Image: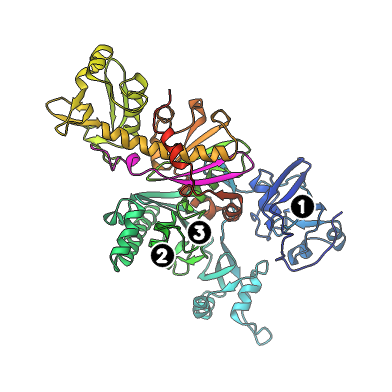
Amino acid sequence: MAKEKIEPELVEHSGLGRVKLDFSPSNQSFKVPPGVSVFDAASWNGIAIDSTCGGHGTCKKCKVQITEGIVPISRLDIRAFSQEELKNGWRLACVARATENLAITVPAMTTRPKAATVGVGRQVILRPAVQKRYLELTEPTLHDQRPDIQRVTDGIDDLEVSVEFEVLQKLPTILRKNNFKVTAVIVDNLLIDIEPGDTTSSRFAVAYDLGTTTVVATLLDLNSGTPVAVKSMLNKQQPFGADVISRISATMLDATALQRLREAGQSTLNELTDEVIQEAGISNLNVYEVAVAGNATMIQLILGVDPEPVGVAPFITATQSWPVLNAKEFGLAIHPQARAYVFPSFGAYVGGDIVAGVLASGMDRDKRVRLFIDVGTNCEIVLSDGNTILTTAAPAGPAFEAASIKCGMRAADGAIEVVKISKEGVTLQVIGDVEPQGMCGSGLVDAVAELAKIGVLDQSGRFVSQEVLEKDFPNLSNRLITLESNEKAFLLHGDKEDPLVFLTQRDVRELQFAKASIATGWRLLMEQLNLNDEDIQQVLLAGSFGSYLSPASAIQIGLVPKIPVMRIVSAGNVAGEGAKMVLLSQPERNGASALLNEVEYVELSDRADFNDKFVLQLGFPI
């Protein structure tokens, strides 16, 4: 049996890298970061522990028995168990911290915890940091002269809350005007407001995917765990540059640029927030928390932190983990004491958006060999062999966003997004079903992949000669044109006299450089884990571009390992999904923080073999 030991709830762990938890009767074992609660560790790994409060310690249903190892007795344990039960190792899982190897018996469930489905098929326990407690308090008398705030905190005696000064300012008036019937609003054990009457039915938060190009806001109902409204728009920082390096440069060249970039980013968030709040028909004062997932540069810009050290060697961020902030730091017009959770970063170029993506895709909880690629100007890569997780960043450049492409354009009406080419001809799919005006990134990849597949582009990426084209591809021979610059190009729309949309030899080279950088990145990680292409059981293509990229085309050009196409999955906006998860579930928020100790960051810029391996990846696979 576990030894009885009463100590403060915050204890130092044994110094182990991870601790092993053996659960029975399921006979499952997991290694988790030290200090994680047994409740969180179980929920992360699919073991259901009875709870109706979601792990806040109020229902006292999450009873487990520690049969091996030591778990200190908390004040909540003393209320839930007899002295004999405590001696026999019974603890509340939500406050039991795993600071050493433990054996744990989990009783059969009597209730079903509320859960929400988010991320890449992830189901999370609905346990928001934002809580509301309706209180009907006794009024003061000469025999009961407790201060107003003590009267409130005594009413929520299962939590040890601290109090915002603004709450004390309004507290006497609110209590007396409402006959001491009020609702306490608590975020992470911080009492941020006292509201008149019973407002427990109105509890909202906003999740932001703060992208360099596009920003997405999702309003969540924290009572049900469901999205209420979603809006997106282009980031208003774009006039300062299309990528983070351009924006960092802007702050280095102009002393006023940082403040203007911050204001532009905050304006973007505020406009989106107003839109989702208006669509839902709620008050902005009922939004009590936000979560922001963005790369390290975007976060520092919107918080007014000098990003210059991020952009120059040795590439240093202001911090890896941000403290919980007041949402005012993001300029948000919501509840004045609302809190903001900012995702931590793995490194300067593998930021909080990737931490959110890893969380949403469950890379740390899956024993399969999985490769996660967020394709963009800066491509982030994560590889897991089921035990070790590595991450890195590869500088792909703007090709995938079509910014450096002769007829490139963003994914808007008129952009060619799908290209099919055979010996008989060319078929195009255009956004908005209008006349083609250019091609976006997915159209570019398709065009190059299709041409390489049928042999119009050779393995080195060069267009075949006009003679070969006329001999082997007569129906396509009129599509190989020579521009006024004397550069070869393949015509996608228009004719030789009036070429409207075409793919140039230089465009092909731009894509080759981009895909070679990415392929070199994941191949170096695979070498570190002694993996081959056939070992990869799943590839996740993340981000807005990854959602539209054809898996077959990605394989054809060598962007991803040569594996069966069914193993390649579009993960969608996993950064936004991760942001939703940390608002809906405190265990997932703890999981996001734990990833910093679980994932190893690999810097490619100082690899002596990078250039040689990069050259090997320039060609197209045979």
Give me the C-alpha separation between circle 3 and circle 2: 26 Å
- Asked whether disc 2 touches disc 1, contact meaning CB atoms under 8 Å apart, the reply is no
Give yes or no for residue 397 being in the magenta stretch. Answer: yes
User: Of residues 151 and 612, which is closer to you in this image?
Assistant: 612
- In the picture of the structure, the residue carrying the numbered disc 1 is 101
Residue 303: numbered disc: 2
The amino acid on which the numbered mark 2 sits, given as a three-letter code, is: Leu
Question: Residue 379's spot in the image, x, y percent?
Answer: 43, 44
The amino acid on which the numbered mark 3 sits, given as a three-letter code, is: Arg
Residue 603: numbered disc: none
The amino acid on which the numbered mark 1 sits, given as a three-letter code, is: Asn
Secondary structure at numbered mark 2: loop
In the rendered image, which quarter is residue 156 located in? bottom right
- Residue 223 visible: no
Secondary structure at numbered mark 3: loop
User: Of residues 45 and 597, which is closer to you in this image?
Assistant: 597
In the rendered image, which quarter is residue 431 located in? top left
Secondary structure at numbered mark 1: loop
Q: Is residue 448 above or below residue 214?
A: above
Question: Residue 103's spot in the image, x, y percent?
Answer: 79, 49
Q: Which residues are magenta?
A: 379-406
Q: Residues within 10 Å of mark 2 (few under 14, many from 20)?
A: some
For discs 3 and 2, the disc positioned in front in the rendered view: 2
Question: Residue 243's spot in the image, x, y percent?
Answer: 34, 51
- In the picture of the structure, the residue carrying the numbered disc 3 is 203
> Residue shown at 34%/23% (left/top)?
458
